[in-house]
Image (tube, grey):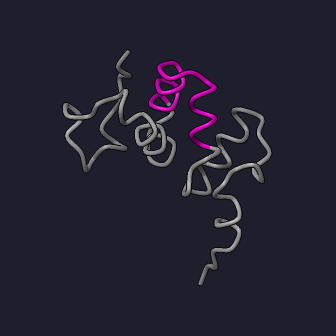
Amino acid sequence: MVPKLTNKAFWDADMNKIDYDRDREAVILKVFNDGTWNDILEVWNCYGKEVVVETLLSANYLKKAAVNLSSMMFTIDPKRYKCYSKIQSQRTL
C-alpha cells in the first residue's frame, strides 16, 4: 500500500521516485518531523503502529515536537526514544 501524502515533508524529493517499502523508515521519520496531521495518520494506517513505533524509538534524530506528539499518540515514555538523550543535551542560545 502506498500512503497518500502531501509534499510538505517531501519538499526536497521527487515523490514519484520514493520506494515506500524500501524507504519506509525515512518516510516515517520525515512525516513525523515535518508532515501534516493527515500525513501522520496515513503513515500509521499504511505501515501499522508496531512498525511506526519501532522506527520512532530507534531514530537517531527526531524533532522535539515529533517526540512529544508520538509519545502522546502511542503512550510512550519519551525516555524510551534513542534520540531523547540527544534532545535533552542540546543547548539553546
Q: Residue furthest bottom?
A: 93
Q: Please tell me which residue lies in front, 25 or 29.
A: 25
Quarter occupied by residue 7: top left
Residue 14 in magenta stretch: no
Q: Residue at x 34, y 28 (%)?
A: 20
The x, y position of residue 74, in whole percent, is 71, 32
Dividing the picture into quadrants, the one containing residue 57 is top right
Report the residue at 35% width, 22% height from top.
4
Q: Is residue 33 left or right of residue 78?
A: left
Q: Relative to residue 7, is residue 84 drawn left or right?
A: right
* Residue at the spot 19% in from the left edge and 40% down from the top edge: 14
Can you say which quadrant of the picture contains the C terminus?
Answer: bottom right
Left-right relation of 4 to 45: left
Range of residues picked out in magenta: 38-56
Q: For this view, does 57 lie left or right of residue 25? A: right
Name the outermost residue toward the front.
22
Identify the residue at horizontal 71%, vertical 42% (top origin): 71
User: Which quarter of the rendering shows the N terminus?
Assistant: top left
The image shows residue 56, relative to residue 16, as above or below, that is below
Q: Is residue 40 above or below residue 80?
A: above
| Front-most of residues 61 and 63 | 61
Residue 85 % position (x, y): 71, 64
Above or below, comparing residue 89 to residue 79 in the picture: below
User: Dominant secondary structure of the magenta stretch?
Assistant: helix
